[in-house]
Image: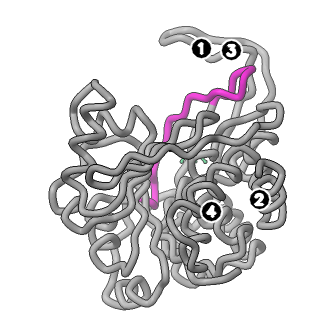
Amino acid sequence: MNGSVLVVASINIDLVVVAERLPAPGETVLGGRFEVHDGGKGANQAVAAARAGAEVTVIGAVGNDEHGARAVATLAAEGIDVEGIRIVDSEPTGVALIVVGPRGENQIAVAPGANATLSLTGVDLARLAAADVVLVSHEVPAAASLAAVRAARRAILNPAPARALPAEVLAAGPILTPNEHELVVAIGNDDTDAALDELAARNAGPVIVTQGAAGALLAHGDLRERHAGYPAPAVVDTTGAGDTFCGVLGAWLAAGADLGAAIDAANAAGSLSVRAAGARAGMPRRDAIYALLRAAD
Ligand code: RIB
């Protein structure tokens, strides 16, 4: 399998405390283990796509610091083209502070740093137009995500973190991959069914609502198609499961799969991704995704 995926990516280093429970507001939870992982939604999606067999390019920004050097080296070690990553002197590399609880659930706060400086040049836009699939999220500036979905032949917009989706983005018709929280925030309606109906009517492209272990719901116009989840191994850390879904969705589509098959592969990959600590350690390679798809047949 191949096909090209270009990710307009946020790139972070994740500073993680694995704790006996997530702290409530104002509370300190003592104990736990400190870990440092590579992260950033876009960079995670790029790694998921590369492991799934796509030829992956990243456009992004890091600081001129130790975290940035580590982040770029880690992506390059996955076989990803990192020439489009800017080294920014004025801002540090993005950092995510993450607490992971006993069931793999998390709390995340992100200082975007260099990610917030990312803007797309004419050369970038030409590269976007040449890629089979472009992936982008809300962790890069809104102007960059809008330019990306407009320039792409086929775009996947992961609307995370949650924010309202402007009409000009929906007019471009990206494949949207919100979870249920991002869905209701995107539309400004707490009723998930009504929010999905409205988003499916307003977006020119398909909407895929990710539902964790329960799978995903595809909505396009009046179509509603449920895609079941796959049995997950023992859940260690759910950080990056949504990114794995998006990266594998992009890799499968870039290789010519139809949307339904790509959603099934992405669901399978997402379920495998939660078996190890950190956003990327559990991300499967293509063979493991096929094995789970075959086992579930
Ligand atoms: O989706 C998980 C990612 O969100 C983490 O890697 C963290 O960096 C934040 O961007």
Q: Position of residue 35 (x, y in %)?
A: 77, 39
Residue with the mark numbered 4? 248
The numbered dot on residue 91 is none
The Cα–Cα distance between marks 3 and 1, rounded to whole angstroms, is 6 Å
- In the image, residue 243 lies at what x, y percent? 58, 52
Q: Residue at x 79, y 51 (%)?
A: 281
Which residue is tagged 2?
Answer: 289
Total marks placed: 4
Q: Are marks 1 and 4 in contact (CB under 8 Å)?
A: no
Amino acid found under the numbered disc labelled 1: Pro
Q: Identify the element where label 2 is drawn.
A: helix
Residue beneath label 3, please? 21
* Disc 1 versus disc 2: nearer the observer: 2
**What colouring does the structure picture have?**
one colour
Q: Which one is nearer the viewer's eye here, 249 or 61? A: 249
**Residue picked out by circle 1:** 23
Q: Is the residue 249 above or below the residue 81 in the image?
A: above
Question: Which one is in front in this view, the residue at disc 3 or the one at disc 2?
Answer: 2
CA gap, disc 1 to disc 2? 34 Å
